[in-house]
Image (cartoon, rainbow, N blue to C red):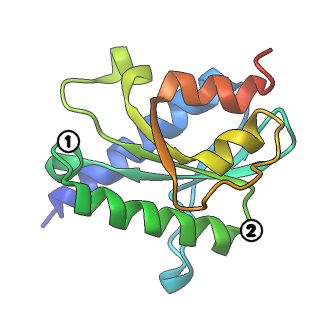
């Protein structure tokens, strides 16, 4: 018997890994679960500012119609996984309703304001660690791949 939610999650993670690898021109791999010490769904991202990063992916109907409480929990989880991995930044990628493979760059991506600052080569002075922003995945890739607005 197939676990449909798990299969959808795996499919979304694989699509996300391929899309990021193509856009960033680097290796992006799905990670194995590490029990309570999970390190994100995707790894091996490297920013132009020299930071290693992880990606947490959320798919299915719950992600497409995410309630604020769900997003808050996923953000907390993403932060914990960044710490577990010792990563310099983390992206939370949420399956976006009516966005398929052809327009995958429009997929929602959340990151902390502190990570945003670090990705563009700035120190996140006086930025609360729990402040988050939402951008599309295309914008997130530009931040990871170019930094400093190059």
Residue 6 shows in this picture: no
x then y, percent, for residue 124: 75, 49
Alpha-carbon span between mark 1 and mark 2: 29 Å
Secondary structure of residue under mark 1: helix
When asked about the image quadrant of residue 102, the answer is top left
Q: Mark 1 points at which residue?
A: 64
x then y, percent, for residue 52: 77, 51
Q: Quadrant of the N terminus?
A: bottom left
Q: Of residues 81 and 69, which is closer to you in this image? A: 69
Q: Of residues 29 and 147, which is closer to you in this image? A: 147
Pointers 1 and 2 in contact (C-beta within 8 Å): no
Q: Mark 2 points at which residue?
A: 86
Secondary structure of residue under mark 2: loop
Q: Of residues 98 and 13, which is closer to you in this image? A: 98
Q: Is residue 134 left or right of residue 60?
A: right
Callout 2: 10 Å neighbours few (<14), some, many (20+)? few
Q: Is residue 33 left or right of residue 121?
A: left
x then y, percent, for residue 125: 77, 51
User: Residue sitting at 28 percent across and 48 percent down?
Assistant: 59
Residue 48: mark: none
Outermost residue to the bottom:
36
The image shows residue 52, relative to residue 106, as above or below, that is below
Outermost residue to the front:
126
| Earlier sequence position, callout 1 versus callout 2 | 1
User: Residue sitting at 52 percent across and 61 percent down?
Assistant: 130
């Amino acid at each position: 018997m197939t676990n449909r939610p798990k299969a959808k999650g795996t499919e979304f993670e694989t699509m996300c890994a391929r899309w990021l690898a193509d856009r960033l021109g680097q290796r992006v791999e799905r990670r194995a679960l590490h029990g309570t010490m999970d390190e994100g769904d995707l790894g091996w991202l490297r920013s132009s500012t020299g930071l290693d990063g992880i990606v947490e992916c959320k798919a299915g109907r719950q992600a497409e119609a995410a309630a604020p409480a769900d997003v808050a929990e996923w953000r907390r989880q993403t932060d914990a996984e960044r710490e577990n991995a010792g990563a310099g930044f983390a992206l939370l990628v949420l399956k976006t309703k009516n966005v398929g493979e052809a327009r995958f760059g429009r997929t929602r991506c959340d990151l902390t304001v502190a990570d945003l600052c670090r990705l563009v080569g700035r120190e996140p002075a006086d930025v609360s660690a729990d402040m988050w922003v939402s951008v599309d995945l295309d914008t997130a890739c530009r931040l990871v791949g170019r930094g400093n607005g190059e």
